[in-house]
Image (cartoon, grey):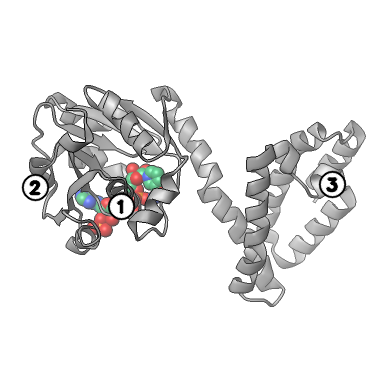
Amino acid sequence: MSTDSDVSIGFVGAGTLGRGLALALAAVGCSVTAVSSRTRASADWLAERIDGCVALDTPQDVADRCNLVFITTPDGVIAEVAAGVNWRAGQGVAHCCGAASTELLTAAADAGAAVGAMHPFQTFAALSEPAAAARRLSGVTFAVSATGWLADYLPSLAQRLDGRAITIADEMRPLYHASAVLGCGYVTALLDAAISLWTQMGFTVEDGVQAAVPLARATIEAIAAAGPAAAVTGPAVRGDAATIAAHLEALSQHAARLIPLYRELTLASLPLARSKGVGEADLAALSDTITAL
Ligand SMILES: NC(=O)c1ccc[n+]([C@@H]2O[C@H](COP(=O)([O-])OP(=O)(O)OC[C@H]3O[C@@H](n4cnc5c(N)ncnc54)[C@H](OP(=O)(O)O)[C@@H]3O)[C@@H](O)[C@H]2O)c1
């Protein structure tokens, strides 16, 4: 079983990723035919948006109806969900967890199912319609590891979504996933910190978002165009210790909780500063300034 027309795809877990991936697969012509979730309302939400997809009561109902089941629950319950289903030999079962490989699906493998881990290096937040979900996956890297027919089929799904499949050694998956978290969730935490300073200045969160987003977007675009070393700006990479000292003084008065974060990011910027030609004496002055407070 390896052609799209043969494969009916089901989802267990209609949350952030389950919704986005199911919508995107449907948008590129895959047969997404069934979904179940912990709550019926979540399954209904997804089924209502995909032609030919039905909301079912249990993971077993989805497994009985589909050739390939994506278990898109939180990471901590994937193995438990997999262990609660009677899988058929030859059926496909996959998850989208970044940090773990197919070991979460041992129960399905023991029953003779082909198993796979297919993790998109992308965020699925705030997707509600198929075309937007498909656009979000275009150009995305998928870490794929699979057995049986899924070894060919999951990479073909990534390609169909206009993404690219790569292989990450199982022991490297936590490191790979740390990269995803640094590049997504922690970017959000960082921008939240930047935006919070606007409220300290008497503006609203919306004012902060309006100010920060064009700046962050241009930064990302510059990185995409030329790489981090060419894109980075700011006092640390100019060797400007006096401005760093002024920032630390302001933070100590208005947002002291952000000083450790600011300090670590300044230190993390020093290799970029060096690559841009900042001399060793200026780098030492920066280090002294940042560790003095
Ligand atoms: N979020 C992302 O952008 C992203 C990106 C890459 C990979 N992932 C991976 O995708 C997977 C899902 O993450 P998520 O962010 O989508 O989580 P999420 O938003 O919390 O969604 C998980 C869904 O699973 C359902 N669920 C929870 N326990 C269940 C159970 N025992 N049986 C059936 N359904 C259950 C919940 O359903 P109800 O709504 O019905 O309560 C919930 O909607 C994880 O493996 C994660 O690592 C996520």
- Residue 80, x across and y down, in percent: 20, 40
Residue at the disc numbered 3: 289
Crowd rating for badge 3 (residues with CA inside 10 Å; few <14, some 14–19, many 20+): some
Residue at the disc numbered 2: 61
In the foreground, 270 or 249 = 270
- Of badges 2 and 3, the one in the foreground is 2
Q: Secondary structure at mark 3?
A: helix
- Residue 55, x across and y down, in percent: 15, 56
Residue at the disc numbered 1: 23
Crowd rating for badge 1 (residues with CA inside 10 Å; few <14, some 14–19, many 20+): many
Total tally of numbered discs in the picture: 3
Mark 2: is the Cβ under 8 angstroms from ligand 1?
no
Q: Secondary structure at mark 1?
A: helix
Amino acid, disc 2: Asp
Q: Is residue 102 visible?
A: yes
- Of badges 2 and 1, the one in the foreground is 1
Q: Is residue 103 visible?
A: no
Query: Does the residue at mark 2 contact the one at mark 1 (Cβ under 8 Å)?
Result: no
| Image-based side of 161 in relation to 86, left or right | right
Residue at the image point whose x is 63% and y is 41% from the top: 224
Distance Cα–Cα, label 2 vs label 1: 20 Å
| Image-based side of 63 in relation to 244, left or right | left
Amino acid, disc 3: Thr
In the foreground, 71 or 138 = 138
Q: Is tag 2's residue or tag 3's residue first in the polypeptide sequence?
A: 2
- Residue 205, x across and y down, in percent: 60, 72
Q: Is 46 above or below relative to 84?
A: below
